Image: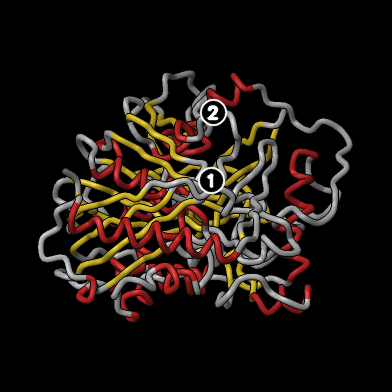
Amino acid sequence: MNAIDAVGVALPRLRISTGEIADAWGRYSGAGIAQKTVAAADEDALTLGIEAAESAFARGSVDPNGVSTLCFATTTPPLDTEEVVPRLVRALGLPSSTMTRTFTQSTLAGTEALDSGLDADGPALVVAADLPRGDPASVDHPFGAGAAAFLLAETGSVERLGSANHVDEFAGISYRERGSDELTGLDITSYERNAIRESVTSAVERLDTDAGVDEFELSAIDGAAVFQPDARMPSRAVTDLPIPRDALARGTVVDRIGDAGAAGVPLGLAAALDAAGDDDRTLAVFAGSGGGATAILFEGHVDSDFDAELDAGSSVTYPEYLRERGYLGTVDVAGGGAHVSLPTWQQSLDQRYRLAAGRCPECGALTFPPEGACRSCHRGVAFERVELSRTGVVRAVTSIGHGGAPPEFAEQQRRDGAYDVAIVELEHEGESAMLPAQLTDSETGTVEVGDEVRAVVRKLYEQEGVPRYGAKFAPVER
């Protein structure tokens, strides 16, 4: 059985004060939330998941090549009908033999992915990433974004002591109609609260009976991450349970990031385990519209640096928030842009995700992309595949303003405004190569020649309705 070896967290850089939303609408429908994270135009569930997973690998003892199972949880996949997990496998450099599982439709997806990974045969990676959307006038008010990744192995420091479920039909609490990308609900407050409270209570109480957890006393719980669509729900959900309030506070993060859907409880769990001691017990309780609840009890501590990730960010105004979320304005694109066929795109994935370059067997120089003749000795050779460093130095930079971008980037410009493009120098074992790339997670014009930047996988653009991803570069201080 696996345990948690490492945890990674990814939160969008942009944040909005809920006071901004209240000023715009004269009210705010997100009880107890002070600020929330805002996904930028080039961020989605996949890119957030990749960033969280990379953070987990950097902290853990498991090499990406050793992962046997990948479980991904989200209610907002980039496409409703197309697997997203193969993109995650390719971007992280996992083996093509990796067993993959996708969990969606409900906020219970997070617990389904985590339980599946803990039960997997061999090292596993579990990623929960989400950015729900809704009517900007009401339902959207509490929605934030984020991702948590759990690297699992037999030698992990956080052990699962047991898990228990409560299954029942509680429809209409939160749902998305077929063909829509926005969540809604029936807005029957008392029904919703009772359904969640009864489900949570039953699942937690069964930890003692069904899961057989020894010496299980709720009053002795050190941390608890409970279903959190707003900041009031965790305490309301456990009204019938003697869980200490300070334990509940340890795993409540919605007040600072907003409702992160299927990633909400995993992010709360990451924060709680970061604050835990080696012998502390932490409870994670997931609930989902139409499906009941699941409770998992853990023991141990693992670093996630949740607070450090939370502290890195910059504020946006409400109009900027609407643009970033894609609610404001329309885009009229003239021309077709640079059409790159899917077969051609497929051939360049390792370059776009993994920064794969070619080393010349004759002179040792690096060529990027690894095509044609060596850029140094100009010989036609069979390049040796190498991966460039994911941190590099800006050697040239310029800004692309409105009207200056290729048509495929018009939607990004509508939401993000002008963007910077740089020539970045990357090294590998003493040799270097240069490549052009977009900059992200920075204000236009703030990155200068000589600055250090790091590669992040982000959405580039859509072609024929299919999103395409690749490396951009962000300042290292992010």
Mark 1: few/some/many CA within 10 Å (<14, 14-19, 20+): many
Left or right of residue 31, residue 404 in this image: right
Residue type at numbered disc 1: Thr
Q: Please report whichever mark, 2 or 1, sits nearer to the chain's N-terminal start.
A: 1
Tell me if residue 271 can be seen.
yes
Q: Which residue is found at the position 29% from the left and 60% from the top?
A: 204
Mark 2: few/some/many CA within 10 Å (<14, 14-19, 20+): some
Where on the picture, by quarter, is residue 94?
Answer: top left
C-alpha span from label 2 to label 1: 29 Å
Q: Position of residue 467 (x, y in %)?
A: 63, 36
| Label annotation for residue 41 | none
Residue that badge 1 annotates:
75
Q: Quadrant of the N terminus?
A: top left
Position above or below: 371 against 310: above
Secondary structure of the residue carrying numbered label 2: loop
Q: Between residue 346 and residue 243, name the one nearer to us.
A: 243
Residue that badge 2 annotates:
348
Left or right of residue 469, residue 212 in this image: left
Q: Position of residue 392 (x, y in %)?
A: 48, 53
Q: Which residue is found at the position 26% from the left and 61% from the top?
A: 205
Where on the picture, by quarter, is residue 447?
Answer: bottom right
Tell me if residue 266 can be seen.
no
Position above or below: 277 against 323: below
Q: How many marks?
A: 2
Residue type at numbered disc 2: Ser
Q: Position of residue 218 (x, y in %)?
A: 23, 71
Asked whether the beta carbons under mark 2 and mark 1 sit within 8 Å of each other, the answer is no
Q: Which residue is found at the position 29% from the left and 71% from the top?
A: 223
